[in-house]
Image (cartoon, rainbow, N blue to C red):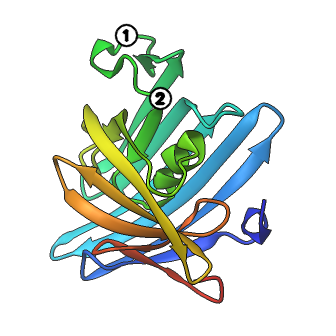
Amino acid sequence: MSSLTQHPAAWSRTDVPEGLGLGTLLPEPDGYRLEAGEVVVEGDERFLTRFTVRTDLAWTTREVRVEVVSARGTESVTLTAHGGNWTDGEGRPRPELMGCLDADVAATPLTNTLPIRRLGLNPGEYRDIAVAWIDIPCLRVRRVRQRYTRHPSEGGLERYTYRDPLRGEYRLSVDADGLVVDYERFARRLGPDS
């Protein structure tokens, strides 16, 4: 792991008038933990998102907890996955998410690290996957099909195309840890590691 495990990455959101995110990737004995938060101001809407995603050693999501603080108060969603079978925070099955191996929190580029690391694509390869997509700030959870295509490295960064039917297609550049440096029309990393 890089120094990002000690110094979180910061992103400026480029899709909203004002937005800033901070996140880190932490190794654990039985997997990895992603911790992040985002603050967004868009018109009259202001909200803070905080989330934790835990994975196994193969980068498959085991648990995700997302909290949003907004004018509506504090709301949260928790999902747990076991072998592609998902339950909510109260243990109720979420059959529409069956087979999803990744969680994608819509407010952050950090969760793109999960499929990038898990798939281990070679340049020129692509993979279609299903993810548990969590919309922010409403916390609606749904199954979304995504495609990741890896391209040749450029300028010391790995390059990917991300595509889904909700948001379209985007180019991503990531560092050696799979953390996003630039996410076309969405976010750009700040600081010396960008």
Which of the two discs, 1 and 2, labels the residue nearer the N terminus? 1
Instruction: Give the residue displayed 29% in from the left and 65% down from the top.
Output: 170
Q: Position of residue 39 (x, y in %)?
A: 40, 69
What is the secondary structure assignment of the residue under circle 1? Answer: loop
Instruction: Give the residue displayed 40% in from the left and 26% down from the top.
Output: 100
Residue placed most toward the observer, 188 or 138: 188
Answer whether residue 118 is visible to the viewer in this image. Answer: yes
Q: Residues within 10 Å of mark 2 (few under 14, many from 20)?
A: many
Q: Position of residue 130 (x, y in %)?
A: 34, 32
Mark 1 lies on residue = 93
Going by the image, does 92 lie left or right of 63? Answer: left
Answer whether residue 141 is visible to the viewer in this image. Answer: no
107 relative to 189, above or below: above
* Residue type indicated by callout 1: Pro
- Residue ranking furthest to the front: 124
* Residue type indicated by callout 2: Leu
Q: Position of residue 177 (x, y in %)?
A: 66, 61
Measure the C-alpha gap from mark 1 to mark 2.
15 Å
101 relative to 36, above or below: above
Q: Residues within 10 Å of mark 1 (few under 14, many from 20)?
A: some
Mark 2 lies on residue = 101
Circle nearer the viewer, 1 or 2: 2
Instruction: Give the residue displayed 31% in from the left and 50% down from the top.
Output: 73
Q: Count the labels in the image.
A: 2
Q: Position of residue 16 (x, y in %)?
A: 25, 76
Dividing the picture into quarters, in which one does residue 82 lie?
Answer: top right
Instruction: Give the residue displayed 52% in from the left and 50% down from the top.
Output: 116
Q: Which quarter of the image is occupied by the N terminus?
A: bottom right
- Residue ranking furthest to the bottom: 192
Residue placed most toward the observer, 37 or 84: 84
Residue placed most toward the observer, 173 or 131: 173
